[in-house]
Image (cartoon, helix red, strand yellow):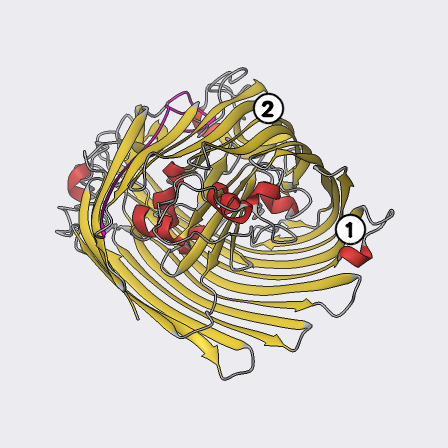
């Protein structure tokens, strides 16, 4: 139970780590180290803006998927292009969609050291220990896939004693879920294991009267995880993690009238089946240094299709208008990283400086088949058209990097950190249109940071970092000289602090930052023939420079032993300096999916008898849906509520998501999709409406 006495520095660090929306715990909170950091240090010691959500927070604020937590994290947004959150934006930086060309995300997404950047559909939450969100370029640590930042999901490790967990969930929208996890020691040899399995299904909040179904946008999500950890003697630690995920969701999310009633005759699918594994080795046999090796592999089969006209024969009668798009993707990634880092006896420069050096290699193979088919016939104009296009492509990329870091001790209270990474990437691309490209490039990133401990309760930091994102190429017909585009870089300057007041009852952290993007990659368009609207081609180009200024802040107040209040917010001004398309002049305009503010606030009450209640409100400002038009979302907020009871070995929660049934948009398109005149109109995808349910957890 929370005490008014002063807590240890270790616990204070843990509280600050979980600051954004962490739930109050009646047990002492354990310190959480940042897995995504080289040395696994507490967030208090890392000179960056970091949010960590622990298992208790995840359990009390989400039902099934990471998508439900995004609104509670400052300056994090997502594009609803696909059923689940796959395309993410941190501080306004990130993709809105990606169908063909170079698999080159701006936001890293890692699950148990397995790289799923750009394909994070599988981010289900059962038996997850914690989630880390690192904002800003990770040029030293993660290189090309983390220009905007990184999201790291860590599942639960084996325990010292046998333990298990059973979870059952039921709710409206015909939602049902069940999960089982258990694990413990293996004999008496310092080894342990943990296994988990979970399945969730629901109808997906759409009705399709044409097909007489209410599950064309449904969810069918299964995950299996296993882990074995082994400490061999005094010097060796091994950890083997395996996972299987089968997310087979429907994709029937858009309606002509922007409602939740869809009219498609060929509903789509957004499915990802992934098998992955990671193997970690730690060696501590030298007085002077330690060695860490991380190897991972992931094989993913991704099927994405949609009814391109969103209608049926009756809806468009007497016109025949029937189109569909299908994308079948097979992606395999293999990563290997080895790091050498100093121990106390191995410090250099008179014992004042820790060092680290490492090597990284990544192999990415992706085979993609895209099929677009359709028929159009307008009897009024006696005009007909048929579309039948297929593109098969093979993409291979080999990346290798060397990186290093020095940490200088400055007096008794300061630390100066210098890091750098040099990366080389070679690509081989071939498709059925005869396009054969072999681009290669060198990329450089790094950081200069300083942390200062002003007191036991106040730490500050300053960081200057450079991130990068590899170049790529466009498919199809593009203007001369626009086939390939260059790599993008981003400079980030940041000041921050992490502190506690009033005997650790009030915890405050925050940072201010300035980003400057150079050779910014933007999807744009070009009109080949004046006054011919059919002659537009779309491609990515280094068309703009961008700048961003903003802040993130987290405040957590323990008003009493039973009552906690928290708030976090992000402010963002992400603009194009100069950017002109045939549709809009975006110079000085906000970038897409970059709301000027995001916020979350809530209160948690816990009675000593075990009853608890919490209310969480998350919201954001309006934002532009894309760079090719000026259409924007509305500002909105969503309220979630929970009432529950916690006993020694079980917990039950009655939950209400989107309690006031708020209508809000997570994606928007502006184009003509209604024959025969095809007037431009805004089409939005709504977020999930109100849902009521109950979750029961039992530990054994």
User: How many C-alpha atoms fall within 10 Å of the one at disc 1: few (<14), some, or many (≥20)?
Assistant: many
Badge 2 marks a residue whose secondary structure is: strand
Question: Which sits in the foreground, 689 or 556?
Answer: 556
Whether the magenta-drawn stretch holds residue 284 is answered as no
- What is the residue that sits farthest to the right in this orientation? 350
Residue at the spot 77% in from the left edge and 54% down from the top edge: 357
Badge 1 marks a residue whose secondary structure is: strand
Q: In this view, does 626 lie above or below 372?
A: above
Residue at the spot 30% in from the left edge and 71% down from the top edge: 700
Q: Earlier in the sequence, mark 1 or mark 2?
A: 1
Q: What stretch is highlighted in magenta?
A: 610-631
Residue 635 sits in quarter = top left
- The x, y position of residue 390, in whole percent, is 46, 52
Question: Which sits in the foreground, 29 or 239?
Answer: 29
Q: Say if mark 1 contacts mark 2, CB within 8 Å.
A: no
Q: In this view, does 224 lie above or below 271?
A: below
Residue 546, numbered label: 2
User: How many C-alpha atoms fall within 10 Å of the one at disc 2: few (<14), some, or many (≥20)?
Assistant: many
Q: How far apart are marks 1 and 2 (CA)?
A: 34 Å
- The x, y position of residue 330, in whole percent, is 50, 60
Residue at the spot 28% in from the left edge and 43% down from the top edge: 253
Count how many numbered circles sit on residues in the image. Answer: 2
- What is the residue that sits farthest to the front in this orientation? 5
Label 1 sits on residue = 355
- The x, y position of residue 294, in whole percent, is 63, 63
Question: Which sits in the foreground, 73 or 623?
Answer: 73
- The x, y position of residue 417, in whole percent, is 73, 40
Question: Which sits in the foreground, 244 or 447?
Answer: 447
Q: In this view, does 633 lie above or below 602?
A: above
**Residue 624 visible from this viewpoint:** no
């Amino acid at each position: 139970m929370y005490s008014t006495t002063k807590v240890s520095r270790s616990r204070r660090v843990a509280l600050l780590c979980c600051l954004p929306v962490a739930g109050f715990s009646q047990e002492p909170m354990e310190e959480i180290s940042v897995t995504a950091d080289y040395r696994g240090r507490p967030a208090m010691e890392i000179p960056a803006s970091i949010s960590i959500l622990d298992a208790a927070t995840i359990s009390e604020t989400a039902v099934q998927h990471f998508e439900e937590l995004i609104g509670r994290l400052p300056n994090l947004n997502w594009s609803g292009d696909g059923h689940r959150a796959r395309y993410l934006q941190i501080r306004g930086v990130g993709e809105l969609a990606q169908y063909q060309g170079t698999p080159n995300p701006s936001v890293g997404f890692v699950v148990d050291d397995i790289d799923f950047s750009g394909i994070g559909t599988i981010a289900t939450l059962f038996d997850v220990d914690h989630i880390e969100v690192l904002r800003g370029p990770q040029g030293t640590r993660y290189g090309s896939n983390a220009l905007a930042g990184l999201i790291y999901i860590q599942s639960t490790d084996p325990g010292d004693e046998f333990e298990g967990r059973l979870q059952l969930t039921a709710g409206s929208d015909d939602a049902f879920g069940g999960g089982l996890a258990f694990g413990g020691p293996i004999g008496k040899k310092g080894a342990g294991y943990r296994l988990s399995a979970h399945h969730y299904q629901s109808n997906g909040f759409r009705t399709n009267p044409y097909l007489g179904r209410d599950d064309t946008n449904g969810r069918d999500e299964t995950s299996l995880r296993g882990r074995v950890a082994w400490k061999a003697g005094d010097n060796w630690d091994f950890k083997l993690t395996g996972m299987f995920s089968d997310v087979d969701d429907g994709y029937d999310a858009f309606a002509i009238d922007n409602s939740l009633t869809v009219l498609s005759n060929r509903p789509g699918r957004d499915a990802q089946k992934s098998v992955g594994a990671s193997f970690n080795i730690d060696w501590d046999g030298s007085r002077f240094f330690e060695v860490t090796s991380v190897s991972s592999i992931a094989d993913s089969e991704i099927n994405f299709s949609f009814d391109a006209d969103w209608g049926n024969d009756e809806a468009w009668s007497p016109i025949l208008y029937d189109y569909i798009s299908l994308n079948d993707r097979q992606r395999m990634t293999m990563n290997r990283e080895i790091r050498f880092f100093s121990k106390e006896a191995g410090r250099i420069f008179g014992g004042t400086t820790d060092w680290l050096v490492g090597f990284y290699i990544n192999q990415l193979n992706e085979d993609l088949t895209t099929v677009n088919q359709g028929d159009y016939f307008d009897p009024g104009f006696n005009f007909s058209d048929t579309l039948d296009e297929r593109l098969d492509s093979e993409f291979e990329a080999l990346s290798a990097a060397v990186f290093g870091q020095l940490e200088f001790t400055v007096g008794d209270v300061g630390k100066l950190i210098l890091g750098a990474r040099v990366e080389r990437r070679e690509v081989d691309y071939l498709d059925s249109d005869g396009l054969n490209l072999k681009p290669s490039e060198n990329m450089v990133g790094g950081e200069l940071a300083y942390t200062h401990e002003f007191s036991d309760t106040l730490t500050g930091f300053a960081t200057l970092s450079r991130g990068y994102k590899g170049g790529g190429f466009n498919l199809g017909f593009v203007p001369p000289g626009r086939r390939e585009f260059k790599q993008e870089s981003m400079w980030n300057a940041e000041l921050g602090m992490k502190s506690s007041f009033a005997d650790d009852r009030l915890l405050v952290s925050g940072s201010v930052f300035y980003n400057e993007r150079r050779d910014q990659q933007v999807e744009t368009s070009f009109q080949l023939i004046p006054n011919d609207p059919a002659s537009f081609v779309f491609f990515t180009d280094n068309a703009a420079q961008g700048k961003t200024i903003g802040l993130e802040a987290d405040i957590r107040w323990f008003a009493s032993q039973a009552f906690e209040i928290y708030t976090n917010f992000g402010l963002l001004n992400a603009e194009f300096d100069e950017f002109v398309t045939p549709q809009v002049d975006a110079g000085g305009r906000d970038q897409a999916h970059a709301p000027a503010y995001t916020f979350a606030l809530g209160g948690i009450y816990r009675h000593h008898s075990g009853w608890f209640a919490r209310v969480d409100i998350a919201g954001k400002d309006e934002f532009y849906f894309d760079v090719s038009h000026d259409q924007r979302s509305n500002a909105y907020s969503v309220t979630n509520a929970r009432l529950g009871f916690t006993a020694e070995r079980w917990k039950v929660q009655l939950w209400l998501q989107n309690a006031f049934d708020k209508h809000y948009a997570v994606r928007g398109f502006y184009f003509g999709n209604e024959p025969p005149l095809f007037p431009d109109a805004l089409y939005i995808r709504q977020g999930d409406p109100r849902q009521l349910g109950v979750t029961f957890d039992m530990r054994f």
